[in-house]
Amino acid sequence: MIRPLAAILLGALGALALVFFTTASAGDNLLFHLGMMDMEPAEREAELTVRMFDRLYVRFYTSGGDLTGLNVFPAANLVKRRIVQDINSWAEQGMILSHDRMAFEVKAVRIIGPDTAIVETNEIWQYIIRDLVTGSRTKEGKSNLIKVRYILRSSGGKWHVEEFEVFGPGDKLPPLGKLWRM
């Protein structure tokens, strides 16, 4: 009776060890769920990723579609595609939607899983519509205060923006959807 039970336990331990040593993020996952993961480096990297995302975002729009740097833009492919499609839509109308970030304040950085982070910001943006050919202003925009919730994933040790949600200054941020909760 003891031998079959020992064999089952040994097999289960062997399977766990195999999963642990063959899955790249298994150690981080275990440390996170045991409450032993050092969050500070991950939080710092997540914030730096959002700052880089914003810098390149502004450059892509303000240039009217010069996508130099798209390969290092820390965003999921669907986010990149959405941005490129929007820039192209403006260009088809002969316009550039120029962005000027007036203020950027990180309100919160939370690591909600071993490979998932949330960064919440308050930002003020000035939007100016320019002519695609001459670059001259065709319409002066206004300054907009917005709240942004960035949802980041880590892959291969690097963070990228998986999604971002924009809210008005008085809006209460809704709870995260099931997809993002761990």
Image (spheres, rainbow, N blue to C red):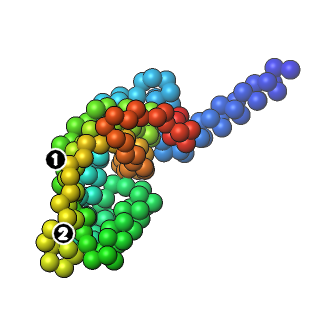
Residue at 41%, 58% (x, y): give it.
79
Residue 60: percent from left, percent from top: 26, 64
Q: On residue 133, which mark appears? A: none
Inspect the image, locate mark 1, and give the three-letter code of the amino acid beneath it: Met
In the displayed structure, 100 sits above or below 71; it is above
Circle 2 residues within 10 Å: few <14, some 14–19, many ≥20: few
In the displayed structure, 96 sits above or below 173; it is below
* Near-viewer residue (150 or 141): 141
Q: Secondary structure at mark 2?
A: strand
In the displayed structure, 165 sits above or below 127; it is above
* Near-viewer residue (52 or 18): 52
The answer to whether residue 26 shows anywhere in this view is no
Residue at 27%, 58% (x, y): give it.
57
The residue under label 1 is 102
**Residue 1 appears in which quarter of the rendering?**
top right
* Near-viewer residue (162 or 61): 61
* Near-viewer residue (165 or 10): 165
Residue 25: percent from left, percent from top: 48, 41
Circle 1 residues within 10 Å: few <14, some 14–19, many ≥20: few
Residue at 31%, 59% (x, y): give it.
73
**Residue 149 appears in which quarter of the rendering?**
top left
Mark in front: 2 vs 1: 2
The residue under label 2 is 138
Inspect the image, locate mark 2, and give the three-letter code of the amino acid beneath it: Thr
